[in-house]
Image (cartoon, rainbow, N blue to C red):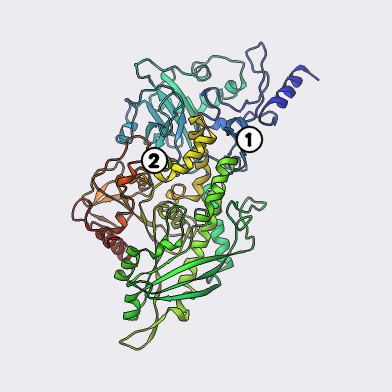
Amino acid sequence: MPPRTALRALICLTALSACTGKDPSGGGVDTSGENDSAAPIDEVYSGCDPVAPTLCGLPFPSTYYMKEDASSATGWRINLADAALPINNNGGQPTGQFLNERDGWSVSSALLAHFPGVDLNNLVGHDRIGDSLLDDSQTVLIDTETGERVAHWVERDVSIEDGENSLLMIHPAAPLDYGRRYVVGLRGLVDVSGAALPASDGFAALRDGTATQSWDTEGRRAIYDEVVFPALEGQGWSRGELTLAWDFVTGSKQQITGRASHIYALLDEAIPDGPAYTVDLVETAPNEHIAFRVTGTMTVPLFTDIDDSGALLTRGDDGMPYINGETTVPYTINVPRVLVDEGRPGPLVQYGHGLLGGQGEVNGGYLAEMANRYGYVLFAVDWTGMKSRDVDAITLTLVQDMGRMAIVPERSQQGFAEFSAAMKMMAGPMVTDPVMQVVNPESGATVSVIDPDRRYYYGNSQGAILGGAYAAISPMFERAVLGVGGGPYQLLLTRSHDFEPFFLIFKTMYPDPKHITLWLSYIQVMWDEGETAGYAKATVSDPLPGVPVKTILHQVAIGDAQVSTLGAEFLARGHQASLIGEPVRPVWGLPTVASTTGSALVEWDYGLEEPYVNHPPAAETDPHELPRREFAGQEQLHHFFSTGEIKDFCGGPCRDLTRFPSE
């Protein structure tokens, strides 16, 4: 065996990841070699980028951890080596399967680097996003297609530790474009004493044109010379001043939205007129506002490998889901007294429940009163994938194999199908069902309580975080209200008290905080196709095939201890939203208008402060439940559903006004 072949074979036997041969594209394969010449011994990558030597997987995301693939929509494919996937305390090797099948990175996650001791004072925080576009910014994010700078902000992840193991996070101010190549640059970084932070040896070699024996470095030189450095120089950044720079490619629209869109098409073909269903119970007058409540089940096509928690989407030869039998889905319908008393139809309002809960939330007192006041037929199903039954599978995955967290966004797409089926049922066969017929007291005619032509969506908390994605997928409604929502999850989780039980598992399984930050970013790559952040640009500006442009009203609370308003602002920019009337504060990138027929963000002020860093606010003063109970907020919602116009109902800044009812 020739010496180079023998060396490579030995490395293959001892490495954590498999050797796959020559890979000049930047893919993650775990082989390397050395000799005495300046040229690398072999054209293979180690799987860990030397420009960021303190943690394999950094900088994140990067084309280093990708390979060229002419068959994909972007021309790229993620190609993470095992070495870039942190191993937990149990010593199990996580799978990269569900990351490596994608043609690009998240359009919404933070960009990561590691600079121990970096001074944040001169870096752009979320309170001055516009400064990231100035010539003197120390960070830059460039769209290589347009050559323009992209607004962003920077923080250090202090959710676990504020020190040597805290990663620097660069957050895009709004969702990035699908299938686009970006370049990141950092310069002039100093520590708290004012001393300059040096570039790594690997990056310095690329920056300064110094030859090395490492294929990790030499195999990347062309990308830096042809893409990275020219993009930065086009913005007036010289190579010599750079501390770190890299490039990455985002996932295509087809990759991020394609499976959910395909599922809807199959669903529509399978149940064009709505699903088969049963009426199991009709409960008369469950409260003073609801005339009757109907519960039952509907039969919906199944698109997952198993009909239970922990499921993954089916995958055909083309990688797309297919129908794998049927599943039975419970539903709840609340018909208000006003429709029965007046013998008339009312609009359909589909409700999305909160975190890992269930459809029973639709029976809440404030919703019942609102339904009766405005004459809404409220209905709900569970968020399959993010309902109470899914908790155990999610917890087990956190402990066993983080790479399988695809179960959450993939089973959530089954949930989208079930929500779509419920809307089809309500606007289809349920309209003429005998249980929905009432007598008009004036004409004596029998009429349905359902007006199938008026259909809207309203979700709170998780119902908003996922609901915006559902809105982007469904062609059956054009207006949605997202209450106390936001995205992406990677931004929200460390700022939420709801995440604390799961955070304990993270900290137990991954004692190094850097690994947790990296895993949350990896998970976001998978999560884009299961939450609103991944669909923002396919909602109002570039809709999916056959889906009308949607209008979104965001109603949120400053100081929310469960869903940070930073996430709502991120989505609002992606939805091209405006602020209405006299907002309680300016939000970068959102114009202020008197009213709009486009999307809008309305923030409520309860006199609470939000932590500047990524910690949750004080839980004991959490206003998370309040905006939905504000009378002015409900009036705004009703006017929007009825007319398509979003206008001010607060008479000035929306502060702690009259909540109605009190519970």
Relative side of 489 to 596, left or right = right
Residue sitting farthest toward the left = 651
Residue sitting farthest toward the bottom = 444
Q: Is residue 177 visible?
A: no
Residue at horizontal 62 percent and vertical 43 percent from the top:
71
**10 Å crowding of disc 2: few (<14), some (14-19), many (20+):** many
For disc 1, the marked residue is 93
Assess whether mark 1 and mark 2 are in contact (beta carbons under 8 angstroms). Answer: no
Residue 312 in the image, given as x and y percentages of width and height: 60, 51
Relative vertical location of residue 245 with respect to residue 271 in this rendering, above or below: above
Closer to us: 322 or 77 = 322
Closer to us: 87 or 431 = 87
Residue 541 in the image, given as x and y percentages of width and height: 41, 51
Residue at horizontal 48 percent and vertical 75 percent from the top:
281
Looking at the image, is mark 2 or mark 1 earlier in the sequence? 1
Mark identifier at residue 495: 2
Q: Which secondary structure, mark 1?
A: loop
Residue sitting farthest toward the top = 36
Three-letter code for the amino acid on which mark 2 is drawn: Arg
Mark identifier at residue 320: none
